[in-house]
Image (cartoon, rainbow, N blue to C red):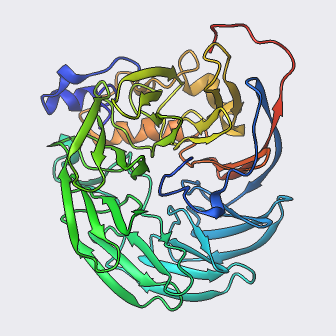
Amino acid sequence: MKKNVLLAAAVTLSIAAQAQQGTTVTTSMFQDKNRSIGHFNPASAIGFTEHWKFKTGGRIFSSPAIYKDCIFIGSEDGNLYAVQETGQLKWKFKTGGAVHSSPAVSNGTVYFGSFDGNFYAVDITSGKMKWKFKTGGEKWIGGKGYFGLKPDDLYTEDLWDFFISSPLSDNNVQNETIYFGSSDGNVYAVNAKDGTLKWKFATNGVIHTSPLLYKNTIYIGSWDTYMYAIDASSGKAKWKFKTGDKMPMSGIQASATVYNDLIYFGARDAFFYALNATSGEVVWKYPADGSWILSTAAAQDGVIYVGTSDTFLMLALDARTGQEKRKFKTCGYVYSSPVIAGNTAFFGDFTGKFYGLSLADTTARAAEFNTSARLHKAGTVLKNDTLNFMYKAQNADLSFYAPNKKVMDEFYTLGPIVSSPVIRDSTIYFGSADGYLYSLDIVNKVTPLTPGKK
């Protein structure tokens, strides 16, 4: 729950004291060749120009994968799209539910999950299905009286649960395995060629995070508050680590990152963790000022970069100690996971603004791009160009679910960027809740920027 957002509900839940005002990449999503950042190495001052945008029939929460001349991305309209680098549709594959999972491409096949409860393997050339694997079903986290909201006999879904687990390939051609989690509480390992089950591992909660593979170990978080380390060959537990369990500050939505033998991830308990990859012991943890951390971290040159929720930040933390080195204020929640190319971090926020943040020059103004929806709606939805839940609630009783959902629906008209970017050379791709897959050209700017301004 957004502590600054659902203030009335927070009082109901006796957590008002926590309220906030106003508010080499090795992640599981970007560790294979399909999400390669290519050879882009920008100067400190860059800008964006829109190359093209491709319209789907629903909101996009999926992050793109790129392979050869195609970008693959899922949409809430139930389709996985293969879009050529020219912006033209190559093919689309229809499922029976929203595609909030991000695709992975390996050995001529694209793998992804759908809210219809299936994980699919589709031929990258023809768009024809090779196989599908049925889980116990996908769902949003929720419950009756969820977060203490009224009416307490109404089943409501979490308004900030955006993803389902995305698949990971081990890229072993001889015995390739696809790993993914499910809302049924299981982690699955299936044969990449035919979709047959190799093993499954049960947790005690919904899994919407994506797996990380490192030294024959799968690392994955569950809504049961645990981060798990599982032997990739046998499916046997190695260790598990518990995060906070006090509602609404509980559960793990962020996927793990590995860097220098440490596992990094954030949780809804408002901490960001660094664990020993072998033992699961805490090396350090960073308090995120009462803010959830839902995005997956990126690492470069001894620094960890990760976004926050209520505090609207992109954080830079020392990888060894967790000491805060820098924080950059955005206009809204940062759920888009950062990708680093050269000395620039790229990510989006929930107001529909996309950023290119210089890591070398901390005085340089970040490059910015606004989604089409943001350009159209910012003046009526945002307060001083910034997300403000209380402003849009207009004195509504936020102890009830309906006005909270109404505010979130208004925020969605901005075209929030929850999708994480992928880069090839000087072109960047990402999805937006306005339904578009965007292709931006990254250009160097020659006009000097005013120091000290965001």
**Residue 129 percent coordinates (x, y):** 61, 87
User: Residue placed at 49% from the left, 73% from the top?
Assistant: 170
Q: Nearer the viewer, residue 322 or 88?
A: 322
Q: Quadrant of residue 321?
A: top left
User: Residue placed at 53% from the left, 36% from the top?
Assistant: 350
Rendered position, 250 above or below 172: above
Q: Quadrant of residue 347?
A: top right
Task: Describe residue 5's horizontal placement relative to residue 79 as left or right.
Answer: left
**Residue 135 percent coordinates (x, y):** 36, 80
Task: Describe residue 207's horizontal placement relative to residue 32 as left or right.
Answer: left
Q: Which image quarter is the C terminus in?
A: top right
**Residue 222 percent coordinates (x, y):** 27, 58
Q: Which image quarter is the N terminus in?
A: top left
Q: Quadrant of residue 360?
A: top right
Q: Nearer the viewer, residue 43 or 244?
A: 43
Rendered position, 323 above or below 452: below
**Residue 144 percent coordinates (x, y):** 19, 54
Q: Nearer the viewer, residue 316 or 56?
A: 316
